[in-house]
Each structure stands twice: as C-alpha cells, then as structure tokens.
Image (cartoon, grey):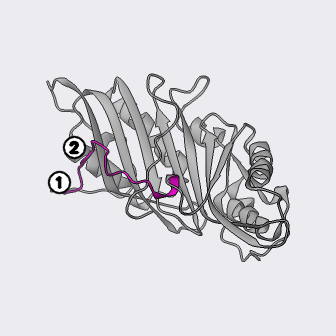
Amino acid sequence: MTDAQHSLLGKETRYDQSYSSEILFPLSRSDNRDLLNLKGALPFHGEDLWTCYELSWLDSKGKPNVGIAYFAFPANSPFMIESKSFKLYLNAINHLSFESVESVEKLLRRDISEAAGMSVSVDIQTVDSDKSAISNDDLPVVCIDHLDIGQLEYQPNSALLSVEPGSCELNEYLCSHLLRSNCPVTGQPDWASVYIHYSGQRINRESLLRYIISFRQCQDFHENCVERIFTDLIEMCRCDSLSVYARYTRRGGLDINPYRATHDLAATAGLFRTARQ
C-alpha cells in the first residue's frame, strides 16, 4: 500500500520507536508521472538528495555519536519515501549500537534501497567535515526575485511561461527563493530555492517568476513539484537543455532536494547549501 493517506503523515506518533525497516513508507512515483503523461522512457534523469542533520547512534560501548547523513535516490527508482516515515526510521536508529560508521551506512543503505526499489547511496559525515560546511557562493547564478511583477496566481499554471520572441539562444543559470508548495496530507508549507539552468531561446524572466510563485497554494510532494516544473519548461519554453534543482528547507531535521535534468547534463546534482538550510 503506497497511498500517502495511509501513511503516518498528520497522525499523532510516538517518535521513540524500536528499530524496524518496516517503518519506511514507500510512495509510487508512477502516480504523479501518469498525471504528467510521462509514460515509457523518462525525458530526464537526476536524483533526490536528502540531508539528515540530526542522525545519531551508539557505539559498541553505548556512547552516542552524531553525524550528518546524505542520501541520493535515483530519479528512476520505482518509489520515493514518505518523509515522516523516514524521520521515524532514522530516529529509531538512535538507540542501536554499531561497531563503526561504515556499519551504520550499510544498514541504512540496505533498508532504504529495499524500500525505494533501487540502490540508494548513503554517506555519513562528521558535523565539522568540509562537506558539511559547503555553500553556493560560487554559483554563476542570477536571482530573479527583484523583478516587479503583478497579476499573480497561486495555483500552478504552465500558461504563465513564455520566451522572448526573436531572442538569440543562450545558456544561463537562474534562481528564485520564492518557491513554496504544501504537503498534500498535512497542508504544512514547504519552502525552497529553485535553480534553473537551461540553454535555448531566452525565457522571459517575469513569466518564470510568476510561474514559480504560482505554486504557492499547490499541494504536492517536493519531487512531484520539480518534475512538473521540468516538464512545463520543456513544453512551454522548448529548452534545448535543462536542469531544475530545488533546495528545500528542512523539517524535523530532514531536507529533500530533487534534481532533474535532460540527458545531456549530469545525472547527479552539485551539493551546496542555501542560507535557509
């Protein structure tokens, strides 16, 4: 059973549970992709990067350890994991003893890969590691949030997107920090910065900002929102090359960062952190 309505979202839950891989609740990706008419070969590849900032476990003597865990789910895995079940599962690790960090990674990789239906990478870092301190300061990105726009809508509408008529083709990297969507079960808001790298005819930036803002009252999961943005940009703006990468803020110590790209671009996302993360 993979319907989110049957998950623990929105229900009172005891977080200090005993460990069990069955806590993980898979959600089928095909449900959303059928709505986007994505049948057969996918027009993108990519991954969903999850960061757990509150991972803890015990060593063989019972001493607590803490770390930051990075998970990469392939975009073509049959299932994604419902986030509350993921938090409950990771919390259940808190009272397990392990001989090494590698043994923690091995257990997480086994359980999560089984739930996702495909191999998921797991990387645990110390809190003060270089990887845990990286940022996006060096990205050659133009933020479009300063644009003065009106006629705003608050439900996703691909018709808002347009290109500059007669413009020359270019390659540019745009971002907006104004993406907001909402959990389809609890209604809680999810906040994100979205990074769009494309080549092709110039996208009208005002239209793009209106489109991003139109997700403000949309109720859907992070991964589905990014796939919708990707498919709408391909259809409406005829991009020759495209990547869409949303860096969502964390909830309950866990963030979810979907990345989708055309097959000429890298299948793995660069790892960085925004100021809100």
How far from the left and from the top, in percent, is residue 184?
57, 60
Horizontally, is 260 left or right of 83 in the view?
left
Badge 1 element: loop
Can you tell which mark lies on residue 147?
Answer: 1
Q: Is residue 199 visible?
A: yes
- Mark before the other along the chain sequence, 1 or 2: 1
Helix, strand or loop at label 2? It is: helix
Inspect the image, locate mark 2, and give the three-letter code of the amino acid beneath it: Arg
**Distance between the alpha carbons at the discs numbered 1 and 2:** 8 Å
Between 132 and 183, the residue placed more toward the observer is: 132
Q: Is residue 168 above or below residue 213?
A: above
Closest to the observer: 57 or 181?
A: 57
* Magenta-colored stretch includes residue 263: no
Q: Amino acid at mark 1?
A: Leu
In the image, is residue 22 above or below residue 271? below
**Identity of the residue drawn at 38% across and 49% down:** 194
Residue at the far front in the pictured view: 61
Q: Is residue 201 left or right of residue 240?
A: left
The percent position of residue 172, horizontal first and vertical second, equals: 26, 34
Q: Evaluate if marks 1 and 2 touch, with contact meaning CB atoms under 8 Å apart.
A: yes
In reply to whether residue 142 is colored magenta, the answer given is yes
Camera-side residue of 266 and 22: 266
**Residue 112, label in figure:** none
Whole-percent x and y of residue 165? Answer: 16, 28
Q: Residue at x 49, y 41 (%)?
A: 259
Q: Residue at x 42, y 40 (%)?
A: 244
Q: Is residue 241 left or right of residue 263?
A: left
Q: Which mark is residue 205?
A: 2
